[in-house]
Amino acid sequence: MPGKPDKPADSYPDNPWPLAAALSLVAVGAGFAAFGHWRRGSLLIGGALLLAAMLRLVLPMTMAGLLVVRRRWIDVTVLAVLGAAVLAVTLVVPPSR
């Protein structure tokens, strides 16, 4: 916006650990899915999204670090809805025979 200076880089949260925890669970879930255990992998990915939502909800902005993208309620809502959707689809799909 004209007339409004950019925030200095020091004001952005930079703690990588909450995001790294969620992404490591996503990576493990993707590994399970790649080796044929798609249901277990999908459950881990959905759980990782819900973990990220919970971390974003309970941690202060400085501790939430790289999970901070927008306002807290938007971040938590998007992550929780996506996590619940992944879990719902995983549990609704019938097992293969």
Image (cartoon, grey):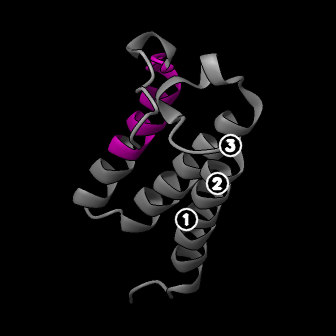
The amino acid type of the residue labelled 2 equals Ile
- In front: 10, or 46? 10
**Which numbered circle lies on residue 72?**
3
Which numbered marker is on residue 29? none
Amino acid type, mark 1: Leu
| Residue at image point 31% right, 52% down | 30
* Residue 41 spot, x, y in % from top left: 41, 57
Residue 3 screen position, x and y as percent: 43, 34
Magenta-drawn stretch contains 17? yes
Label 2 sits on residue? 74
Q: Is residue 40 above or below residue 14?
A: below
Q: Is residue 87 above or below residue 50?
A: below
Residue 82 is marked as 1
Q: Residue furthest front?
A: 3
Q: Which residues are magenta?
A: 12-27
Looking at the image, residue 40 lies above or below residue 18: below
For the residue pair 34 and 15, the one nearer the viewer reads as 15
